[in-house]
C-alpha cells in the first residue's frame, strides 16, 4: 500500500485563507415594533467603481418582519492579494430579481 501525504497548512486554499483580510465589515440590526402591520425587506448589494458607476447589483435576501421580530444583517468585503496585474474586462451590470 502507498499513502499520499498531504500537508493541509501548505495547501493553496490554506495559504489563500491566511492572506485574505476583511477590508470592510458592517453589522446592523432592525426590530419591528410590537404594534403595526408587517414590514417587507430586501437586502440589496450595489457595487460601484471609482467614478460612481454601478458595476453590479444583486438582491441577496427578501423577507418579512412582524411585530416584535428582529433581524441582524452583516456585510463584509474580503480581499485577497494576487500577483495578477491584468485588469479584467468589465462585465455588464447584472440586475437582481426581486420576488
Image: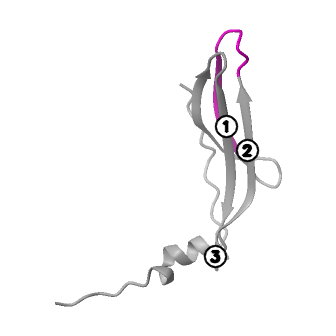
Report if residue 33 lies within the magenta region.
yes
The residue sitting at 58% across, 29% down in the picture is 62
Image coords of residue 71 (percent x, y): 65, 32
Residue placed most toward the observer, 57 or 90: 57
Left-right relation of 13 to 87: left
Residue placed most toward the observer, 44 or 11: 11
Tell me the element at label 1: strand
For marks 3 and 1 on the same chain, the one whose residue lies earlier in the sequence: 1
Counting every numbered tag in the picture gives 3
The residue sitting at 71% across, 26% down in the picture is 31
- Circle number at residue 27: 2
In this view, the residue farthest toward the bottom is: 2
The residue sitting at 74% across, 53% down in the picture is 25
In this view, the residue farthest toward the left is: 1
Q: Which residues are drawn in magenta?
A: 32-46
* Mark 2 touches mark 1? (CB < 8 Å): yes
Q: Of tags 3 and 1, which is closer to the observer?
A: 1
Left-right relation of 20 to 27: left
Tell me the element at label 2: strand
Which corner quadrant of the image does residue 42 belong to?
top right
Which corner quadrant of the image does residue 34 belong to?
top right
Tell me the element at label 3: loop
- Circle number at residue 6: none
What residue would you read off at disc 3? 82
User: Tag 3: Cα neighbours inside 10 Å, few (<14), some, or many (≥20)?
Assistant: few
What residue would you read off at disc 1? 72
In the image, residue 5 above or below residue 38: below
Image coords of residue 79 (percent x, y): 67, 65
The residue sitting at 49% across, 84% down in the picture is 10
* Mark 3 touches mark 1? (CB < 8 Å): no
Amino acid at each position: 500500500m502507498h499513502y499520499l501525504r498531504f500537508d493541509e497548512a501548505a495547501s493553496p486554499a490554506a495559504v489563500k485563507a491566511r492572506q485574505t483580510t476583511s477590508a470592510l465589515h458592517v453589522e446592523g440590526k432592525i426590530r419591528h415594533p410590537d404594534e403595526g402591520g408587517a414590514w417587507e425587506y430586501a437586502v440589496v448589494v450595489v457595487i460601484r467603481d471609482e467614478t460612481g458607476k454601478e458595476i453590479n447589483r444583486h438582491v441577496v435576501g427578501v423577507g418579512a418582519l412582524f411585530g416584535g421580530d428582529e433581524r441582524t444583517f452583516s456585510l463584509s468585503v474580503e480581499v485577497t492579494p494576487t500577483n495578477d496585474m491584468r485588469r479584467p474586462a468589465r462585465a455588464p451590470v447584472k440586475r437582481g430579481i426581486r420576488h
